[in-house]
Image (cartoon, coloured by chain):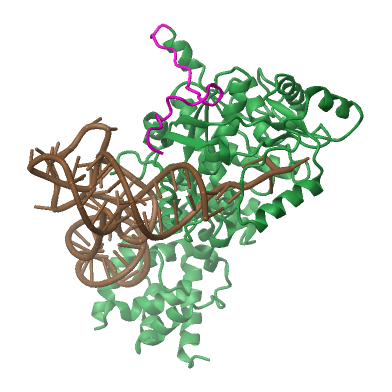
Amino acid sequence: MPGEGCCARAPDVSSWAPKRVPGGAQGNAMESQIRVRIAPSPTGTVHLGLCRTSLFNWAFARRHGGKFILRIEDTDHGRNTEVSEKAILDGLEWLGLDWDEGPDKGGPFEPYHQSQRVKRHLEVADELLKSGHAYRDFSTPEELDAWRAAQEARKQREAYRGKDRDLDAADSQARADGGEAFAIRFRIPEGESSFKDLVRGDVTIPHFEIDDWVMVRRGGEAPTYNFVVVCDDFDMKISHVFRGEEHLVNTPKQLLIYSALGQTAPEFGHLPLMLGTDRKKLSKRTGDTALGDYQAKGYPKAAIVNFLALQGWALDGENDLFTRDQFVGAFDIGDVSKAGAVFDPKKFLWMAGEYLRQESPEELLDHCLPYVLEDGLMTADVASERRAWLLQVAASVQDRLQLYSEFPDWIAHFFAADDQVSYDPKAEKGARKRERGVELLGGFLDALDSGDLSGDPAALGSATKEWITAQDAKIPELFQPLRCALTGMPGGPDIFETMDLLGLDRAKARIRAAMDRLATPAS
RNA sequence: GGCCCCCUCGUCUAGUCUGGCCUAGGACACCAGGUUUUCAUCCUGGCGACAGGGGUUCAAAUCCCCUGGGGGUCACCA
């Protein structure tokens, strides 16, 4: 395309430039006018992609002292569910992404359900019809199918231009008045649309690619997403639209509407997609995609926020761990990367562990307790009675946890009958390997009974080590069978701490049981 | 397939706009040591990338062109 003067000669209607207030006079005013939104459709579960998009929008609003708005995009009546809507509200709230206006909070631009704004959408559609930017298309679904089939047959796909695009206005009106069904389509002009994407820079999309898309479905009552989103963003004075890259090619459609309305469009920024390990849009095929899955497994919410922030953004390239406040303080939409980010579950897990380890025993216990109750290890009443004990237990296993849900596995042995502790094969094998195991266990028990060995965990520990040496044995010769006797597990917290937590009597009972069990051959 | 977007270690990324400080830095993962009674934590070290090819330049990961690869999108879904 030699000699084409770049974007300089793009037709009026398609050439859009963000409105900038030059001088600094209105600087503060502009700042406070920053309004971003997310417009999720309440279908299915709360996708991590939505969480990431929400996080970036939220951070942008907080960073610039703007407003973050939640609007429920329920235009597809067939697929919407109230359960899903509630899950979205709950999920975002749980993550701490508080919104300033929304369906539950209200605000100056109510209502915040798109379905309740249809009247206004239809008014706008009518306006566009009158101004000639849109037209009635009386095509039937069958005709459309036929057109598509023909395209298919020719192995090409060109933008649809409605059959009734050039219908005389009076004819069109007459047929409508006569009760003939029609859809309202937008009349795509020739040319191309260019815009400055805050993430991607200059983007140009030729109009011959874009259908005369449907704004209002046949029947005249159901506006479509691409249309309502513009109406609502405009009415709600949205200043910036940050959304996933899958919407990039939709942008000209929306820009054209603003232009037809004679309005300034918001600025756009298209976030890189979150990819699965197959490098395709993150989907259930390659792993969990729902926020609820991670919530249920016990990922600390701060870890989720931190990890999501890292999908397409970095604090400084050195530090992966940062607080929400640091994120907000440093977030710049221009720093968001353009390339898709492959979701790495292992790094996510690591990060969960990092955050979990930062918690106080109280916090940790509060987060883990639901899993303990769920597993039926104890009742809530018992748990609160034994809180002090649980706190110690929590502290003892903290370094070994990555997720809250792992907690019960570490403490389940405490709740077993002392003669029925279940032995992990690895632990039992290690214990049986020690020929003097049963003998040493017996000697240790005697020393415990006689009071020769006693004291707090640390003192008991060092005394026991000396005792072992005196028996002319090596430390693991007692410790391995002892650990098996006490917990049945191959690894775990300090043995003497565990004994302390268990109580001396129960510890002895377990040692006695182990002596019997380990004395007979493994079954 | 058309159009659009993208391309630094296996993965997330810093560096790219404003060429030189980059013999490309950090993190996860992996491997090897150390610490520990064990597991985990923790510490130390290692492995490992500028997609390829042309240009421009004294100098290119950074600028330009071509090729290749990946993704997104092509609905009266959102």
Q: How many marks?
A: 0
Q: Quadrant of the N terminus of chain A?
A: top left
**In the image, residue A127 above or below residue A175:** above
Magenta run includes residue A456:
no
- Residue at 73% x, 19% y: name it: A127
Q: Quadrant of residue A334?
A: top left
Q: Is residue A300 left or right of residue B67?
A: right
- Residue at 70% x, 19% y: name it: A131
**Viewer can see residue A401:** no
Magenta residues span A1-25
Please, which residue is most extreme toward the bottom here?
A: A521
User: What x and y, as percent, mark residue A195?
Assistant: 47, 29
Chain letter tied to green: A
User: What x and y, as percent, mark residue A515?
Assistant: 46, 84
**Chief secondary structure of the magenta portion:** loop
Q: Colour of chain B?
A: brown
Please, which residue is most extreme toward the right here?
A: A178
Q: Quadrant of residue A208?
A: top right
Magenta run includes residue A10:
yes
**In the image, residue A322 above or below residue A413:** above
User: What x and y, as percent, mark residue A53?
Assistant: 52, 39
